[in-house]
Amino acid sequence: MLLILLGPSGCGKTTLETKLTERGIVRLRSHTTRPRKSGETDDAYYFVRRDEFKKAQIVESVLYKNFFFGLSASEVEKAATQDCVVTLDWNGAQQLKRLYPFALTVFIDVPMYQLEKRLTATLDNERRKEILEQIETDSRCATDCDYIVRNFDGQQEEALEELLKIFANGKK
């Protein structure tokens, strides 16, 4: 089974993904052409050159800040025998669902006032405005997702349990 986590910046997708892996769910790793960031773990991405990226049988990809990010067919095939999770944007999720209709999309919902509160205080007004506009854009896909899971402040464990229930219900 494959769950695709979607939602705006600051909604807790990555944290929930990490907590799912702690419960035995396999996180699918994307390939990227960007260099490794300082302190980034070896399993964050498959760090590859552009020519390697083109040979990797990528089934979902995006160009972001002049670097490619994408999920390979071999990563997605893990979902045939294991419970898997991946965090993508809406476009990536749509690309993946066209090829793998068994994948389920889950929108991680957080009220706007909580997202605003979660934004770092060190952001300048222009960057803060850009992020809030992107949050509004990302939130428009919620109604088109297979599930919506609330991750309100103080309810992270409940959100995690909801995701685990989706995995359990998918096996019936």
Image (tube, rainbow, N blue to C red):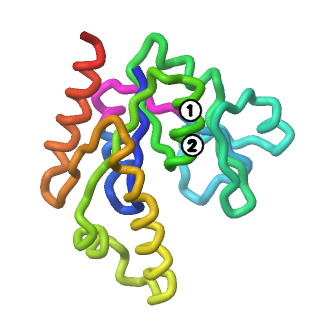
- Label 1 is placed on what type of residue? Leu
Packing grade of label 1 (10 A; few <14, some 14-19, many >=20) is: many
Question: Residue at position x 39%, y 30% from top?
Answer: 104
Tell me residue 105's x, y (percent).
39, 36
Could you tell me if the residues under marks 1 and 2 are in contact, i.e. CB atoms within 8 Å? yes
> Furthest residue to the front?
143
The region drawn magenta spans: 20-28
- Label 2 is placed on what type of residue? Gly
Quadrant of the snapshot with the C terminus: top left
Tell me residue 67's x, y (percent).
72, 55
**According to the image, label 1 marks what residue?**
96
Give the vertical position of 26 relative to 53 (above or below): above
Which of the labelled discs sits on residue 92, or is there none? Answer: 2
Question: Residue at position x 55%, y 35% from top?
Answer: 29
Q: Is residue 126 left or right of residue 19?
A: right
Question: Residue at position x 80%, y 44% from top?
Answer: 49
Circle 1 sits in a helix, a strand or a loop, which is it? helix
Disc 1 from disc 2: Cα separation:
6 Å
